[in-house]
Image (spheres, grey):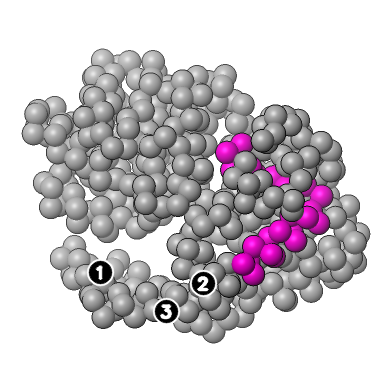
């Protein structure tokens, strides 16, 4: 398995490959993981290593890119400075980062990076990792290579190793790389985009199977790469969770806690804040019983905007915590919050945040403030009654009132999504589909990608 992100990295990218790796080992497969030893982990979580089967060897390939090392060092210093600053000092530091000259220079640097770093920011990892993967193939003689994407570089590693050893490879796209979804992709000049498309098309053409999260994503790739991606190779396996749906437990408290877990970097929260303003204006005493807890990162802009709107008393933030700790916090929350991506982001309707699937396992009410995207489709499928349109503060108010009423009346369990439908997203029910993809079997549902 070629996975750039792997424990002790604790970001959202590691959970899908980790779940499936455990499922494969439980089914009798033997595996070797080829991963990265980065300059800095986004969320360092040593406890996740305990979930890796003891029989699985992990080959770590160090990053060797001075420019990326410098960026990691600068980000670490900025994070340390913000953590040790008061709220006013942190606001001044962040504002300084977005001064006009800094913003112009940053945009210039991003344009240069978009032209130089291809197919993505970790391109320097490809060469040494491909050599280590080839060596691992020669040593372990695997039946198949499985690359989890993003980054796209993981797929390039598997492609090169396959061409050198003859071992077939399978691509698992966790995100819509190559469709212009990511900002760095949209900054690339046309010649660079054509070059990247040729790489992706070659990877598709030679792959044994290609896995996507949703039918809509598979259809988008089939349209974007006609002739390169054979629909008989395409498998649709959504994200999921490890284990069973947890039983509902009612936790009393003086305030109704709504939890948001993860990064807020590319998610839209303006409608949520506008809804809170309306709620507080209409009934400040009742609204004071509401508490929105954000655990993760990239919350500074949220904090500042909430302060400006006068609803900062309703919002609390915490830095990232371990996976085990976030699961404990989820169980103590009265409801869980999921948001949609920024509307101007290309392809935002094709994705659903990985946090959603952890929410499905938690057995708690899920509030979705979302556009018409995959997140909304999944919430509708699991029969969630707490969906508000991302453009409607009034719907946000109505949804929060439903939660507050149920909390006050001890009736939150009635808002929990359909447990049976949620169980369909358990990795234990998905592993057979992955095994079909690894073996090169035909997809279970051909109509899913029959254009």
In this view, 54 is above or below 234: below
Q: Residue at x 76, y 70 (%)?
A: 130
The residue to which callout 2 is attached is 189
Where is residue 423 drawn, in percent x and y?
A: 59, 25
Q: Which residues are magenta?
A: 194-218
Q: Are marks 3 and 1 in contact (CB under 8 Å)?
A: no
Label 2 vs 1, first from the N-terminus: 1
| Mark 2 burial class by Cα count in 10 Å: few <14, some 14-19, many 20+ | few
| x 30%, y 55%: residue | 299
- Foreground residue, 334 or 118? 118
Q: Using the numbered discs, state the Cα–Cα distance from disc 2 to disc 1 in whole angstroms.
A: 30 Å
Report if residue 379 is visible in the image.
yes
The answer to whether any part of residue 35 appears in the image is: no
Residue sitting at x 84%, y 43%: 440
Is 376 placed above or below 136 here?
Answer: above
Position of 250 with respect to 445 (left or right) is left
Q: What is the count of numbered marks?
A: 3
Residue 43 position within the rendered picture, expressed as x and y whole percent measured from the top left = 48, 59
Secondary structure found at label 3: helix
207 magenta-colored = yes
Pointer 3 or 1: first along the chain = 1
- Can you identify the residue that label 1 sits on? 94
Q: Is residue 300 magenta?
A: no
Image coords of residue 251 (percent x, y): 35, 26
Question: Residue 194, how many percent across, how many down?
Answer: 62, 67
312 left or right of 52 in image: left
- Residue at numbered disc 3: 109
Give above or below for 312 relative to 83. Answer: above
Q: Residue at x 66, y 35 (%)?
A: 451
Q: Quadrant of the N terminus?
A: bottom right
């Amino acid at each position: 398995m070629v996975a750039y992100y792997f424990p002790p990295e604790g970001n959202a990218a590691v959970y899908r490959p980790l779940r499936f790796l455990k499922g494969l080992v439980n089914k009798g497969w033997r595996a070797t993981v080829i991963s990265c030893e980065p300059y800095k982990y986004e969320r360092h979580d040593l406890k996740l290593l305990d979930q890796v089967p003891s029989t699985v060897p992990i080959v770590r390939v160090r990053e060797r890119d001075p420019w990326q090392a410098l960026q990691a060092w600068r980000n670490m210093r900025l994070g340390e400075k913000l953590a040790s600053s008061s709220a006013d000092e942190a606001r001044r530091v962040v504002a300084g980062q977005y001064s006009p000259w800094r913003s112009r220079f940053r945009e210039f640097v991003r344009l240069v990076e978009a032209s130089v770093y291809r197919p993505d920011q970790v391109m320097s990892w490809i060469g040494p990792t491909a050599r280590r993967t080839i060596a691992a193939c020669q040593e372990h003689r695997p039946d198949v290579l499985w690359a989890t994407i993003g980054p796209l570089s993981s797929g390039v590693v598997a492609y090169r190793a396959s061409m050198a050893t003859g071992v077939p490879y399978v691509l698992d796209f966790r995100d819509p790389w190559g469709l212009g979804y990511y900002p760095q992709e949209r900054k690339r000049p046309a010649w660079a985009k054509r070059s990247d498309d040729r790489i992706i098309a070659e990877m598709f053409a030679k792959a044994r199977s290609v896995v996507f999260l949703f039918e809509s994503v598979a259809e988008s790739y089939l349209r974007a790469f006609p002739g390169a991606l054979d629909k008989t190779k395409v498998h649709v396996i959504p994200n999921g969770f490890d284990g069973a749906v947890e039983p509902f437990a009612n936790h009393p408290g003086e305030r109704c806690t709504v939890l948001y877990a993860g990064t807020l970097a590319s998610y839209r929260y303006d409608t949520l804040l506008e809804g809170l303003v309306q709620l507080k204006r209409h009934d400040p005493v009742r609204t004071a019983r509401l508490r929105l807890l954000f655990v993760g990162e990239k919350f500074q802009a949220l904090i500042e905007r909430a302060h400006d709107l006068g609803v900062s008393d309703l919002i609390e933030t915490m830095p990232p915590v371990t996976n085990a700790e976030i699961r404990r916090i989820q169980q103590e929350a009265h409801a869980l919050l999921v948001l949609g991506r920024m509307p101007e982001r290309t392809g935002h309707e094709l994705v659903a945040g990985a946090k959603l699937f952890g929410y499905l396992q938690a057995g708690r009410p899920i509030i979705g403030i979302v556009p018409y995207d995959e997140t909304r489709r999944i919430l509708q499928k699991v029969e969630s009654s707490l969906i508000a349109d991302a453009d409607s503060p009034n719907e946000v108010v109505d949804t929060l009132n439903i939660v507050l009423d149920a909390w006050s009346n001890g009736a939150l369990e009635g808002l929990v999504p359909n447990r049976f439908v949620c169980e369909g997203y358990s990795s234990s029910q998905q592993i057979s589909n992955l095994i079909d993809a690894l073996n090169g079997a035909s997809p279970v549902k051909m109509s899913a990608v029959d254009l």
